[in-house]
Image (cartoon, grey):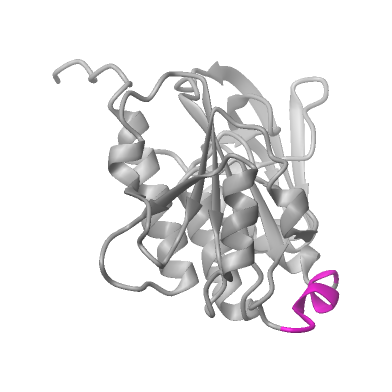
Amino acid sequence: MARRRFFVSEIRNRQAAITGDEARHLSQVLRVEAGQVFEISDNREVWLAEVETARKAEIVFRILDQVEVAPELYQTHLYVALIKFDRFETVLEKATELGVTTITPVETVRGERGLERAASKRYDRWRRIAHEASQQSRRARLPELREVVALPRALEQAAARRFFLDEARRGRPLLAALADPAAGDTVALLVGPEGGWTDAERAQAGAAGWLDVTLGETVLRTETACLAALAVIAAAYETLRPAAPPG
């Protein structure tokens, strides 16, 4: 069974600590005790570490050894229209589990009005969600949660592959568009609001060089479309990873 993995702010003198609410959760809920061994990440590298002390307000780890992490095959930059916050938080949590590199909320014509102003008050909560999802899914690094941008700014994202997910089903199937993936690719995915894209927004994306893609005949909610597309992308690039040795 894989060891639990936790994120720490820094490692100094081969020690690291978790404090505050997270320390209380580890000590009181997970019953972490001195002598137990876990994996920790400083958002750069992953280490095997033993708990030296476990108190309600602080868990102190001692570094034992470095953990080899599988190479990153690709990076995914998710641009998603701002939707109602409960649904956006589902996207944030599940996209983190699926390995997304960055997540950027986007203002769109048919997006929920006023959410861009309210979003600024949610970032602490959203970072906690991403942090917890990263630990649960044993990521080596946290995703970057970026500030809200207008659509023209999102369309400036540079990437080897840039996909504009369109509910009008005018483009190629996403899986076909992902043919011949290459290690080291950057993939940008743009997903629209519940009300769909306007013709003007489609024209902007096309003019900026984004490729129209579809997930099939059914019209999906924004959060469903995000997660389905990210899963397809992940599956395509996982074909590049060498098979694990038998046994």
Up-down relation of residue 155 to residue 214 (above or below): above
Q: Quadrant of residue 16?
A: top right
Mark yes or no: residue 121 visible.
yes
Residue 122 locus on image (x, y percent): 78, 71
* Magenta segment includes 40: no
* Magenta segment includes 117: yes
Looking at the image, residue 124 sits to the left or right of residue 94; the answer is right
Quadrant location, the C terminus: top left
Residue 41 locus on image (x, y percent): 64, 33
Please, what is the dominant secondary structure of the magenta stretch? helix
Taking depth in this image into account, of 172 and 34 the one nearest to the observer is: 172
Mark yes or no: residue 78 visible.
no
Up-down relation of residue 89 to residue 97 (above or below): below
Quadrant location, the N terminus: top left
Residue at image x 52%, y 74%?
196
Q: Residue furthest bottom?
A: 113
Looking at the image, residue 95 sits to the left or right of residue 208; the answer is left
Q: Which residues are magenta?
A: 113-120
Residue at image x 57%, y 17%?
65
Residue at image x 49%, y 42%?
138
Q: Quadrant of residue 128?
A: bottom right
Residue at image x 59%, y 25%?
47
